[in-house]
């Protein structure tokens, strides 16, 4: 069987903001699947230890009051999230995300913030295989016009997104988009072993970042810098 018919795990975070170096986790989810079929999910609600901006609350619906009353201590929960993620990777299960450099880099930054072992140290080597539905979609359908948000990409591939910006729902949708991509683009995606596909995404992401940086420097911002590293910064 190809990877998209075998066990996978979807991973998603909802956070206090959009900077993985400084922002904090509010909710997290790991969704275990076989292909696109959901088997179960593990979710976390954290007290991030800092105020949740109104802009972030408007997106994911979690405000300071809920986080403080019901959220787990951040250090404890971050350690659990990393342990659960690494357990699946160590067992050979690919992790599927949508914009992996955000979620994985933010989790790694949280681990370092609390003096906990980062992901690569826990795994004893590189973090992977990671399958990033956003990176794959950009590579195989490069010239499609319009937004590349998870909601829009789900529409393109006929994936139901039941509750956008709820971590478990987004994680499952990322898996189902990845499976849809594998089914549609067999030669480029579906028939490629996860480890090889992981390495291809390193190049695809670098190519996209360099192209975006060049475009920005020609027009909007001559000093623009787009980090080309994937899946971790």
Image (spheres, grey):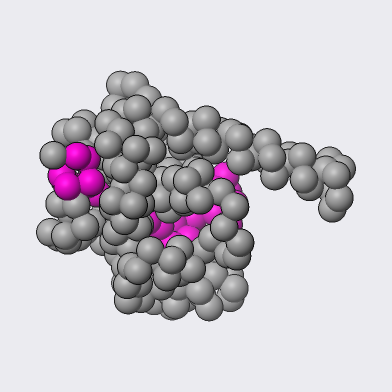
Location of residue 45 in the rendering, given as x and y in whole percent from the top left corner = 33, 64
In this picture, is 14 found above or below 183? below
Image quarter hosting the N terminus: top left
The reply to whether residue 64 is in sight is no
Image point (55%, 54%), residue name: 23
Residue drawn at (34%, 21%) of the image: 125
Residue 221 percent coordinates (x, y) = 84, 48
In this picture, residue 40 sits left or right of residue 181: left
127 lies left or right of 139: left
Q: Residue at 30% of width from left, 33% of height from top?
A: 192
Q: Nearer the viewer, residue 141 or 19?
A: 141
Q: Across the whole image, how many numbered discs are drawn on residues?
A: 0
Q: Bounds of the magenta span?
A: 2-28
Q: Position of residue 56 (x, y in %)?
A: 54, 70
Answer yes or no: is residue 187 visible: yes
**Residue 12 or residue 15, whichever sits in front:** 12
Q: Quadrant of residue 91?
A: top left
Give the residue displayed 35% in from the left and 27% down from the top. Answer: 196
95 or 74, which is in the foreground?
A: 95
């Amino acid at each position: 069987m190809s990877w998209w018919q075998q066990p996978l795990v979807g991973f998603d975070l909802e956070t206090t903001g959009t900077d993985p170096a400084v922002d904090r986790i509010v909710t997290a989810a790991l969704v275990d699947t076989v292909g696109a079929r959901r088997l179960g999910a593990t979710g976390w609600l954290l007290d991030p230890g800092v105020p949740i901006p109104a802009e972030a609350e408007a997106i994911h619906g979690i405000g300071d009051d809920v986080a403080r009353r019901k959220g787990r201590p951040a250090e404890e929960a971050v350690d659990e999230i990393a342990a659960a993620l690494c357990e699946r990777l160590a067992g050979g299960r690919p992790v599927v995300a949508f914009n992996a450099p955000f979620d994985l880099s933010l989790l790694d930054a949280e681990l370092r913030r609390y003096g906990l072992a980062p992901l690569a140290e826990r795994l004893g080597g590189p973090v992977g295989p990671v399958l990033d539905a956003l990176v794959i979609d950009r590579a195989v359908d490069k010239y499609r016009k319009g937004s590349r948000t998870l909601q829009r990409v789900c529409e393109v591939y006929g994936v139901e997104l039941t509750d956008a910006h709820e971590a478990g729902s987004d994680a499952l949708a990322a898996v189902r988009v990845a499976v849809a991509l594998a089914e549609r683009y067999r030669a480029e995606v579906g028939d490629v072993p996860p480890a090889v596909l992981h390495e291809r995404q390193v190049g695809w992401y670098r190519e996209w970042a360099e192209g975006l940086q060049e475009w920005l420097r020609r027009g909007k911002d001559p000093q623009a810098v787009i980090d080309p590293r994937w899946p971790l910064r």
